[in-house]
Image (tube, coloured by chain):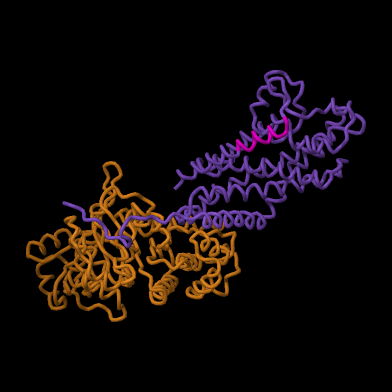
Chain colours: A purple, B orange
């Protein structure tokens, strides 16, 4: 039995992969949908602020009684950039749950059968999550005057830049995990297990200098460390700390005896963003 | 090949195609890929010169399980073509291969003139797809869902607004365009999905169990939608169903069982092939009745709680049948054969209600989940 070839419209076999313009339009649309959905779920916006509020005001003032305030700079001011970074990371990773959500409610199929690349869908999702997370982080940042942290327009924009990069990395990380996990519960558990240690070991809540060796090693292995430090660096530089205060609340991550420049830290985060995006795309390819 | 009569007059292009190509599926049982539809395809779809859907010995194997076995058929442009069979017969597997969601393990298929294995991206651009389960974003409005689809299917920006208005109008949901989908009933959501699948003016519209789990009134509305889409947009419709009455809307029906096409023709021709009449007998001992009727040379099938006899001129045969059965007969029902009877005739089984129920509850779950 021979199977005759199927007659096709074109003489030679030519497929029609999406053009770059079509891919960019898709990325824009997926991004926009993430924003619409976020804006429609007010409870999600509010709940995103509860944890950072507790850390800033409760932990911040609580710890101030233990740690001395030196020349007007105390723990609450120190912890603010950490809390901003915390808001961004929690929101970014949390936004990846939309993949699990989409699968549960069937919308993922609508996206996966469309004549677009999986990469465009992933990039759109990641940019959407990054935009939402940076927005939340920036709202937190604007609370700075309440705890006496001085901000300039330049500082705000620099921090937003760091937030976007950090959020992109973490959303991509979240999606690379979410695309490999089938259930909503599973995702929540995995994220809780990873997010909490990552936050505590990132230097968001305490200075990294002078830690016991084992703890120092772990913090250096934590990717979040390199995303948190630039934010603190930018905010603290605008506070005009006295040398004594700067010594008590140091910034910078030292690796093999040298303190990394901020550009190197951001470079590490950017490299991780690319790596996690690739992982997220490959995870998405296996989803069906 | 034009052995086909009794095609309802409202089907123009599809009817002609059916005429030219009836008998294709019958060849499928042997897996013989006959050269069919060449003339008809060229005549009916001059812009493409090929059938809207064509398969040759299409197969899908999962390990030792042959889910689809040497299926060959051809659907002409503008036709409404139904795959009728119980759950697990291979309907969804076939539709998934045609929509490039599954790779065939044997044979070939083309959709809208593109090869599903070698030109999957081109195929996807030219088909509309409505899944068995709901795939809308219920946080978005009807319009937002449609706009999302329009962009992902590359509808030119300047045409998006016009197409959205058009498809919403076709399913009579124009006044709900700014409402969030979570406020829609199951039937409305389904109709919105059909509208969405038509947004990018596909050549072929695939509907996988389009009305499962919906009440009869809504099912009728959805059929109006489908027929209107065919009429006004000239789309070819390929659907799967296990509702017999639904297959009646189709120009041609392929009956699929255990991954193979067991019959393919117009609903009328299928009914005629079964016999002119169906006599359903409920007796005190159906097994005995079946055996005696068979021994007497009647065409008999055993159905649930009845034996079914396919014969010409049923009314006048009733006395003879009762005589043959020799057991107490509780009920006799003579009727023109339905597609139910056709399915029973070709497979020896009824499309059982339990299959309808199981997928109904699946959809119910999806609906329930959507509401949360």
Q: Is residue B204 above or below residue A95?
A: below
| Residue B102 location (% of width, % of height) | 36, 50
Q: Is residue B303 toward the left or the right of residue A194 in the image?
A: left
Q: Is residue B244 above or below residue B119?
A: below
| Quadrant in the rendering for residue B99 | bottom left
Task: Between residue A92 and residue A120, name the one nearer to us.
Answer: A120
Task: Between residue A126 and residue B272, name the one nearer to us.
Answer: A126
Work out whether residue B352 can be spotted: no
Q: Is residue B334 above or below residue B52?
A: below
Work out whether residue A165 can be spotted: yes
Residue placed furthest toward the bottom: B9
Residue placed furthest toward the top: A213
User: Of helix, strand and loop, which mostly describes the magenta segment?
Assistant: helix
> Which residue: 30% across, 44% down?
B62
| Residue B22 location (% of width, % of height) | 21, 69
Residue placed furthest toward the front: A12
- Determine if the magenta segment contains residue A265: yes
Position of the N terminus of chain B by quadrant: bottom left
Q: Report the magenta residues as a range.
A: A261-272
> Which residue: 58% across, 46% down?
A97
> Which residue: 16% across, 75% down?
B314
- Determine if the magenta segment contains residue B245: no
């Amino acid at each position: 039995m021979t199977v005759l070839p199927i007659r096709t419209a074109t003489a030679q076999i030519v497929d029609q992969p999406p053009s770059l313009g079509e891919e960019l339009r898709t990325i824009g649309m997926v991004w926009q949908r993430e924003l619409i959905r976020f804006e429609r779920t007010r409870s999600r916006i509010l709940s995103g602020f509860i944890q950072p509020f507790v850390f800033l005001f409760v932990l911040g003032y609580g710890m101030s009684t233990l740690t001395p305030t030196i020349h007007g700079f105390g723990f609450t001011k120190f912890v603010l950039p950490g809390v901003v970074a915390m808001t961004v990371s929690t929101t970014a990773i949390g936004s990846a749950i939309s993949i699990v959500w989409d699968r549960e409610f069937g919308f993922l199929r609508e996206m996966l059968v469309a004549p677009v690349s999986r990469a465009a869908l992933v990039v759109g999702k990641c940019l959407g999550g990054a935009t939402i997370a940076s927005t939340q982080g920036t709202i937190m940042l604007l609370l700075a005057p309440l705890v006496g942290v001085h901000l300039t327009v330049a500082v705000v924009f620099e921090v937003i830049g760091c937030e976007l990069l950090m959020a992109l990395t973490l959303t991509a990380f979240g999606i690379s995990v979410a695309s490999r996990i089938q259930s909503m519960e599973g995702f929540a558990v995995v994220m809780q297990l990873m997010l909490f240690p990552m936050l505590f070991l990132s230097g968001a809540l305490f200075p990294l200098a002078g830690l016991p060796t084992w703890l120092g090693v772990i913090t250096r292995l934590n990717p979040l460390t390199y995303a948190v430090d630039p934010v603190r660096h930018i905010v603290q530089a605008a506070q005009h700390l006295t040398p004594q205060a700067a010594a008590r609340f140091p910034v910078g991550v030292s690796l093999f005896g040298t303190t990394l420049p901020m550009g190197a830290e951001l470079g590490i985060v950017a490299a991780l963003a690319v790596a996690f995006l690739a992982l997220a795309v490959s995870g998405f390819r296996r989803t069906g | 090949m034009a052995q086909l009569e009794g095609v309802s007059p409202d089907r123009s292009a599809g009817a002609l195609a059916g005429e030219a190509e009836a008998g294709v599926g019958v060849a499928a049982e042997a897996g013989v890929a006959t050269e069919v539809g060449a003339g008809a395809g060229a005549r009916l779809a001059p812009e493409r010169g090929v059938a809207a859907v064509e398969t040759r010995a299409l197969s899908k194997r999962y390990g030792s399980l042959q889910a689809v076995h040497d299926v060959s058929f051809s659907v002409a442009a503008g036709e409404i073509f139904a795959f009728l069979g119980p759950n697990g017969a291979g309907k969804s597997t076939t539709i998934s291969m045609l929509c490039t969601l599954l790779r065939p393990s044997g044979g070939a298929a083309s959709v809208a003139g593109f090869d599903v294995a070698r030109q999957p991206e081109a195929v996807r651009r030219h088909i509309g797809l409505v899944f068995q389960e709901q795939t809308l974003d219920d946080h978005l409005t009807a319009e937002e869902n449609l706009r999302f689809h329009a962009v992902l299917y590359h509808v030119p920006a300047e045409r998006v607004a016009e197409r959205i208005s058009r498809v919403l109008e076709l399913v009579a949901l124009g006044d709900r365009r700014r409402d969030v989908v979570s406020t829609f009933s199951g039937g409305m959501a389904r109709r919105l999905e059909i509208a969405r699948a038509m947004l990018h003016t596909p050549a072929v519209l695939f509907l996988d169990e389009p009305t499962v789990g919906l009440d009869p009134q809504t099912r009728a509305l959805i059929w109006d939608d489908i027929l209107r889409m065919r009429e006004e947009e000239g789309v070819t419709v390929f659907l799967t169903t296990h509702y017999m009455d639904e297959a009646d809307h189709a120009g041609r029906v392929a009956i699929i069982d255990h991954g193979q096409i067991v019959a393919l023709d117009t609903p009328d021709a299928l009914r005629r092939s079964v016999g002119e009449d169906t006599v359903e007998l409920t007796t005190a001992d159906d097994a005995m009745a079946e055996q005696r009727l068979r021994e007497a040379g009647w065409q008999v099938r055993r159905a649930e709680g009845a034996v079914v006899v396919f014969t010409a001129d049923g009314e006048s045969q009733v006395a003879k049948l009762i005589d043959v059965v020799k057991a107490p007969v509780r009920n006799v029902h003579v009727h023109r054969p339905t597609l139910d009877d056709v399915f029973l005739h070709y497979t020896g089984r009824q499309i059982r209600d339990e299959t309808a129920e199981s997928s109904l509850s699946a959809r119910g779950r999806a609906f329930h989940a959507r509401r949360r």
